[in-house]
Image (tube, rainbow, N blue to C red):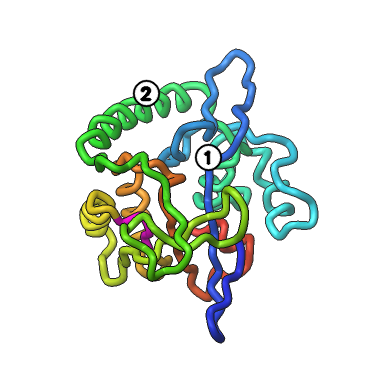
């Protein structure tokens, strides 16, 4: 996470990405987050943790060392894990599903991805593949893709001069407006933990067909979630 200072205020900004190496499980199918979303955790699901998922010295290391020996979701919860921990660990390849749970999740995820692909095609804007464009000043912007470079040199992120805000778009109602905004050309989307619509924004992005590298997403965490560990564990 990083801290962006604007005047006297501090905004904790966090960019999340799924990165992991699939775990090798002998004799049984295994599923980690190489390309799949976290499952809906059920007590009887069989799981396997890696030995050293968390770094020593972090706030979550001691807890992880207690629950990583669990063989099922129920055992992990009994040993102190929360479902938010399971999501976090799955997203980074620290825990995998094994056996029947893995097979079931693979089938469900494959079905969901096929449906999402069909839906994405229907929503994809004509200019989806066009990257964000850096201009010299905000006044020089001519399209919703134009913005100012946050840094120098090739590859510096571009902050569009105009964005689509999601304040007061309620949980469960924000996906369609965000999809329409992306279709209209907006490439900057603003959300926040306190808006409770981040999941809707994410769903709209997935279905929009606009490549992630052509979007600038900003969010803010509530004061109860300040700090790296707590920020990164927000669900």
In which quarter of the view is residue 57 placed?
A: bottom right
Residues marked 2 and 1 touching at CB (< 8 Å): no
Callout 2: 10 Å neighbours few (<14), some, many (20+)?
few
The answer to which of 23 and 206 lies nearer the viewer is 206
In which quarter of the view is residue 188 placed?
A: bottom left
Tell which residue pokes out farthest to the top in this image. 27
Asked if residue 46 is among those painted magenta in the image, a careful observer would answer: no
Horizontal and vertical percent for residue 192?
41, 66
Q: Which residue is mark 1?
A: 73
Callout 1: 10 Å neighbours few (<14), some, many (20+)?
many
Residue stretch in magenta? 186-190
The answer to which of 126 and 180 lies nearer the viewer is 126
Of discs 2 and 1, which sits in the foreground?
A: 2
Of the image marks 2 and 1, the number of the one nearer the N terminus = 1
State how far apart marks 2 and 1 are (Cα). Answer: 20 Å
Q: Is residue 197 left or right of residue 101?
A: left
Residue at x-position 41% and y-position 46%: 131
Tell which residue pokes out farthest to the right in this image. 56
Q: Which residue is mark 2?
A: 107
Residue at x-position 55% and y-position 48%: 88
> At numbered mark 2, what does the secondary structure look like: helix, strand or loop?
helix
Horizontal and vertical percent for residue 142?
32, 60
Q: The N terminus lies in which quarter of the figure?
A: bottom right
The overriding secondary structure of the stretch rendered in magenta is strand
Residue at x-position 53% and y-position 73%: 11
């Amino acid at each position: 996470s990083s801290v962006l200072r604007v005047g006297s205020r501090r905004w904790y900004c966090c960019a999340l990405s799924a990165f992991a190496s699939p775990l090798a499980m002998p004799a049984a199918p295994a599923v980690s987050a190489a390309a799949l979303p976290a499952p809906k955790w059920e007590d009887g699901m069989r799981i396997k943790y890696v030995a050293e998922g968390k770094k020593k010295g972090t706030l979550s290391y001691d807890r992880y060392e207690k629950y990583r020996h669990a063989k099922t979701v129920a055992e992990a919860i009994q040993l102190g894990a929360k479902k938010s921990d399971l999501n976090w660990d799955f997203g980074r390849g620290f825990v995998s599903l094994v056996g029947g749970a893995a097979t079931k999740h693979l089938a469900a995820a494959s079905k969901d991805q096929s449906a999402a692909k069909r839906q994405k095609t229907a929503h994809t804007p004509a200019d989806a593949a066009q990257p964000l464009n850096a201009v010299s000043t905000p006044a020089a912007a001519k399209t919703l893709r134009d913005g100012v470079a946050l840094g120098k040199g090739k590859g510096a992120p571009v902050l569009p001069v105009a964005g689509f805000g999601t304040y007061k778009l309620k949980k469960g109602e924000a996906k369609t407006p965000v999809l329409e905004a992306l279709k209209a050309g907006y490439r900057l989307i603003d959300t926040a933990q306190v808006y409770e619509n981040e999941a809707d924004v994410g769903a709209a992005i997935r279905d929009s067909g606009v490549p992630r590298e052509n979007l600038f997403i900003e969010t803010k965490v509530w004061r109860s979630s300040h700090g790296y560990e707590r920020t990164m564990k927000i669900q």
